[in-house]
Image (cartoon, rainbow, N blue to C red):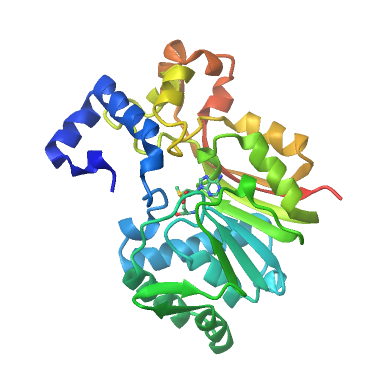
Amino acid sequence: MFFTQLLPKKIREFFRGNLYVFSLYLAMENLLVNWRTKHHTGRTFNALSVEEGVEYVDEVFREYLEVGQFSTADILGKKILEVGPGDNFGVALKFIAAGAEQVVALDRFSQIRDSNKEANVYRCLEQDLSQSEALKMKSAYGMVNGKIQVDPQMIDYWENCPVESYKSSDGFDLIVSRSVLEHVADLKVVFEAFARLLKPGGTMIHRVDLRAHGMFTDRSDMFFLTLPSWWWSAIGSRTGNINRTRCESYTQLIRQTGFEVTNWIINHHYSDFSVKSVRPNLAREFSPLSDEELSVAGFSFSARRRV
Ligand SMILES: C[S@@+](CC[C@H](N)C(=O)[O-])C[C@H]1O[C@@H](n2cnc3c(N)ncnc32)[C@H](O)[C@@H]1O
């Protein structure tokens, strides 16, 4: 628990409503981040009911297959790296059920987990599987002293382990992430790590959300792009706040680090009105961008490591 969370809700809401006070609050969290042992950064299951958790996991898994243009048969025997699983193993378990040899799951932070909810979600996920798939899923986890534990032969979980510092002697066939890349501090270093960790010809699939992630909700949807970079860095460089990198920089980095894009889907757009309204106030780094690029608010892609 972080000390600002001890403040009454009303005072915290007052903080959020005032740009300067809210920024100071975030800057303080940013400075003191190392005092926290557990985080709420991947709060999927914490924020969702069991039914919503099941739907979310199913949707994420289905989308990986769609974007990667895979069928479940393509997963058989594959070694998969899931970056930033957050507070649950739902997607990793779906890959195991589909016949993956092993999923390595790495998260930069140690997460606050709700093991009972996790167990309920996993039991519901099993109900929609064939008997043999459900058996595979069941064999990958168990409840030990009230906590979900995974079998490292099937799901090898590392917390407090940013992907850029992970070393592995044998390569992965597939790397996946959802809502992670927009949080990494240095995207080039992360794409270089993906190139190092994937086998030649291996695939990576990521979904990236370029929106404000609920910050400054009382302002316009693109307001966060008006804050200068020193301000942005002060309020979140160490807490995993979003990095504000825009779409075109991703495509350049993907090419530079040895990948070719195999599929690219834009999931969200800002309206023309939002783009035109924010244009006069944009922070310096964003003003050279075209309206078209600024309008991209989220995308999914797959890319193949060049042989
Ligand atoms: C917004 S959450 C998304 C969690 C989950 N993928 C989902 O869809 O709900 C982002 C997650 O990425 C993790 N993360 C951020 N940077 C990372 C990095 N460099 N390496 C590994 N995990 C990272 C965070 O700790 C957090 O759990």
Residue 15 visible? The answer is yes
Rendering coords of residue 79 (x, y %): 69, 66
Rendering coords of residue 89 (x, y %): 48, 66
- Describe residue 84's horizontal placement relative to residue 302 as left or right: left
Residue at (35, 27) in percent of width and height: 27
Total numbered labels placed on residues in the image: 0
Residue at (70, 74) in percent of width and height: 76
Q: Residue furthest right?
A: 307
Q: Residue furthest front?
A: 35
Is 44 located above or below residue 209 in the figure? below
Rendering coords of residue 45 (x, y %): 36, 61
- Describe residue 214's horizontal placement relative to residue 156 as left or right: left
Residue 262 visible? The answer is no
Rendering coords of residue 145 (x, y %): 35, 78
| Residue in front for this viewpoint, 226 or 103 | 103
Is 125 located above or below residue 289 in the figure? below
Residue at (58, 19) in percent of width and height: 289
Image quadrant where residue 199 sits: bottom right
Q: Residue furthest top?
A: 280
- Describe residue 141's horizontal placement relative to residue 174 as left or right: left
Residue at (36, 62) in percent of width and height: 113
| Residue in front for this viewpoint, 297 or 253 | 253
